[in-house]
Image: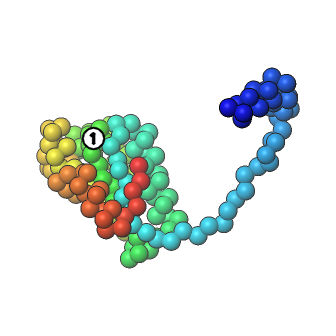
Amino acid sequence: MKMFAWVLAVALSGWFPQVMAEGDAPWGSAAVLDVEYQPGKVVYDLFTGSADEVANILDRVGYLYKLTGSEPFDSSIVVVIHGDAIPFFAIREWERQRELMTRAQSLTVGAPIEFRMCQAAARAQGYQPGDIHGFVQMVPMADAEIVRLQQEGYAYMQ
């Protein structure tokens, strides 16, 4: 409560708006850390129905692979697809999702990046394995696959 009262007093005193109005950076600018990342095992949980969010995940997967040294024997990235993300990977959506699917498939070429889809969720949405692009592997259940991968040491990402 004391902190709130202090912030309120500063704001009301006119100091805070003055600092912001002057365009100053009262805390300076961000420092850049020189960090080297080691290859690892990561599982991405992809369930969104937003094309922008799917594109964001694909960007992150590609960049993570690039940052960790691209060592196929020391790294593994698995994207587990379920929920509203399933239709993006359907063959019948090829014309609408051509750019996203081309990007997703290209991540699997020569890299330890895999896409796995929940067969139970796909079936519930009316999709069979033959309805999904060939670079995707079907697993019985997304949640069970994510748990299994975490038990094998994979870090969970959303």
Residue type pointed to by label 1: Gly
Vertical comparison of 31 with 12: above or below:
below
Residue at the front extreme, as displayed: 2
> Where's residue 33, x and y in %?
67, 62
Identify the secondary structure beneath mark 1: helix
> Where's residue 81, x and y in %?
29, 49
Q: In this view, does 40 lie to the left or right of 152?
A: right
Q: In this view, does 62 lie to the left or right of 118?
A: right
| Residue name at image x 72 percent, y 33 percent | 2
Which residue has dot 1 on it? 83
> Where's residue 137, x and y in %?
22, 57
| Residue name at image x 34 percent, y 36 percent | 49
Does the image show residue 138?
no
| Residue name at image x 80 percent, y 26 percent | 9
Disc 1: CA contacts within 10 A as few (<14), some (14-19) or many (>=20): some
Does the image show residue 50?
yes
Vertical comparison of 137 with 122: above or below:
below
| Residue name at image x 84 percent, y 33 percent | 19
Q: Is residue 131 left or right of residue 9?
A: left
> Where's residue 25, x and y in %?
80, 42
- The color scheme shown is rainbow
Q: In which quarter of the image is residue 83?
A: top left
Quadrant assignment for the N terminus: top right
Q: In this view, does 88 lie to the left or right of 21?
A: left
